[in-house]
Amino acid sequence: MSPAAFFSFGLLLARRRWLVLGLWTLALLLMLPLAPRVTSALQAGGFSARDLEATRASAVLSDLFGFSPAAVLVVFSSDTLAADDPRYRAAVDQALADVRTMPEVAQVVTPNDSPRQIAADRHTSYAVLSMRSLPEDFRVFLPELRRRLHPTVLETVLTGAPVFYSDIQEVTERDLRRAEMISLPFAALALVLVFGSLVAAAVPGVVGGTTVVVTLGLMVLLAQLTPLSIFALNLVTMLGLGLGIDYSLFLASRFREELRRTGDLAGAVAVAEATAGRAVLFSGLTVLLGLLALMTFDFMALRSIGLAGSLVVALSLLAALTLLPALLAALGPRIDALRVPWPTRAMGRVAAAEHRGFWARLAHVVMAHPWRVMLPVVALLVALGLPFLRVQFGAPDATILPPGVESRRAFDLLQQRFGAGEFSPILIVLQGDASPLRPDNIPPLLDYVRRLEADPRVERVDSALSLDPRLTVEQYQLLYRQPDRIGDGYARAMVQRTVRGNTLVLQVVSRYGQTDDRSKELVRQIRATPPPSGMRALVGGGTAGVLDYADRLYWDFPRALVLVLAATYVVLFLSFRSVLLPLKAIAMNTLSLLASYGALVVVFQEGALRGLLGIPALGFVEASLPIVMFCVLFGLSMDYEVFLLSRVREAYEASGDNAASVALGLERSGRIITSAALIIVLVSGSFVFADIALIKALGLGTAIAVLLDATVVRALLVPATMRLLGDWNWWLPGGERRRLARRGTGLRGEQGILPPS
């Protein structure tokens, strides 16, 4: 849309302001009852895809062996009683007596049934409850399970995927409330300081709050049609509040500036819409494009983050371009009512003082020494991003939850007492044309198992062919000569657990944790090793799932990367009317994003700020975080480039002086950009105090990227590079320049439509 179209639209909104306000009020009233139900409508999973090898292995295990992804582990422990004490065994049976009769429970295996479920300390054990439902159905059966689980002399805690999902829902709700309590008062204070008026400060809050409530209500409706991940919830709140306030800040500031200069209410709304509103549209499109790219991935969690994020950005744009102008038109000069008692700078001064203000002086200093500024700043941003070369990717597990949560406490206890790899074994599914226990199949299979057992990274292999290292091929052939009449009880139980028809399962227990590099390399080596002749192999389990998840993400990422970069370039080309400025903006955005990537590794993988922020060293970065951050932040931090260069372009079209235009544009927008960025940093930074590590990481990464982008990049790199490029900043091929001029959107195309700045 041309500036003239925005100008006309602004006039229409000013005339029809009460109709627009009425429609938004109706939407708010309709969505208000739905918004509180959003957490119960969302799902906690979404990090797997059906065609991954680990997922296909899991499907075989579920179909043939009844392996349940919804297994609940009941962990028993006692400081005084040992697991072989009759009182301990009786307490286990007593605790589970009513659980066994639940229709949702398919099978119960207790430590009394399986000695492997008793830790070496003899005081800790666990029971496995295989559920008939999926883990995402925890709301259906988990409350009843907790009710039926009887208290005993043993300490009892629960873990497993359903409990993990339940805890994520509870902690996410708590994190959201905490973030709102921290961020909203500080954001309100920042707005009061910027506007100097309580009424003006309230307007962005109204727009941002309305956007969030309407989005949450629509998410409840969308969740009835397609699965949505609960991990989208905090992002929606962060973006809704941040962008709603951000966009309102720019539009309201330009409105006040024009109203003070001309006194024409409708004209002020129209000019604000045609200048700041047009910049908001192009800025919002860059954020929207990044989030839409997330919908190209195979994982429900990323798709739902992209869908919900795109929805909140679209509504933020709609509210900024319709609700806000209507509010401004309704308030008029009353927007400056209830002024605060401290002195504030008038935002409408655009005379000669603009050339002597702080931001103008800074721009002139930078442009006087562009190379001396640019090279150290680029070196600093690159240095901040270098730790990302050490990144180790992982997938979400109980360690993303705080230590005090039940599923995390049980997980940590099991890890300590049973070993890091005990509960994330590598599962090898071997399938042939005949029974694996047939005499001619046993020699190659036994050789395959023995080679696995000999690997120093392997703690043990559980299978029908790893009963005892002293058994020979001949003894195994004799033992399984009649598979339906096996005399040894342990061998019979192991066959029941690991053999079905033509399928054999090997459970390989690593000495190391699920995300440890040595476990990952072990999976890669197993997959690279040919299975016994005539057999097919699928490798699954926790570590294999992590590898498949990360590999698929980064196989798909280049497609999303190209989509975002190409679409962003087109949007910025249309906004800046320049061939080179979009390229420069993309390069600088990448630098600030890489710096935030480096922070992820240092803070979350390596635990550098553990004492200050209470963030433990996870040992890995969740694999989707860099991708989500790229798709969210690439457009979000581009906001300030769009707003700054929009003001620079206005000045350049009026004067044709590149250096003076940069200084004037920075002076006119620097204070507002800094204030807007501060609010985004406050809103996103409040999520650093969340209990879920993924939310902490997203909040910290967003805060760092926006802070760097709005300060170091915009205040130093932009003036330096604009000075070095000179008039090349605004270069267009001759034909394109003439085409835009004919449409009234080329250089100087706005003169006559907008009053001179």
Image: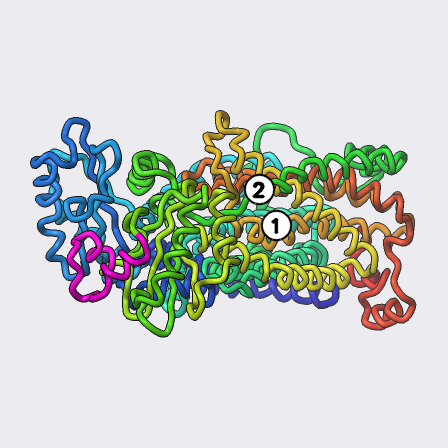
Circles 1, 2 touching at the beta carbon (< 8 Å): yes
Q: Earlier in the sequence, mark 1 or mark 2?
A: 1
Boundaries of the magenta span: 472-495
In this view of the protein, which residue sits in the foreground, 237 or 504?
504
Question: Whole-percent x and y of residue 26?
Answer: 42, 63
Residue 479 drawn in magenta: yes
Q: Is residue 442 left or right of residue 117?
A: right
In this view of the protein, which residue sits in the foreground, 710 or 617?
617
Let me know if residue 354 appears in the view.
yes
Let me know if residue 35 appears in the view.
no
Q: Disc 1 designates what residue?
A: 633
What amino acid type should be assigned to the residue bearing mark 2?
Gly
Crowd around label 2: few <14 · some 14–19 · many ≥20 (10 Å): many
Question: Whole-percent x and y of residue 750?
Answer: 81, 62
What amino acid type should be assigned to the residue bearing mark 1?
Leu
Q: Main secondary structure of the magenta part?
A: helix
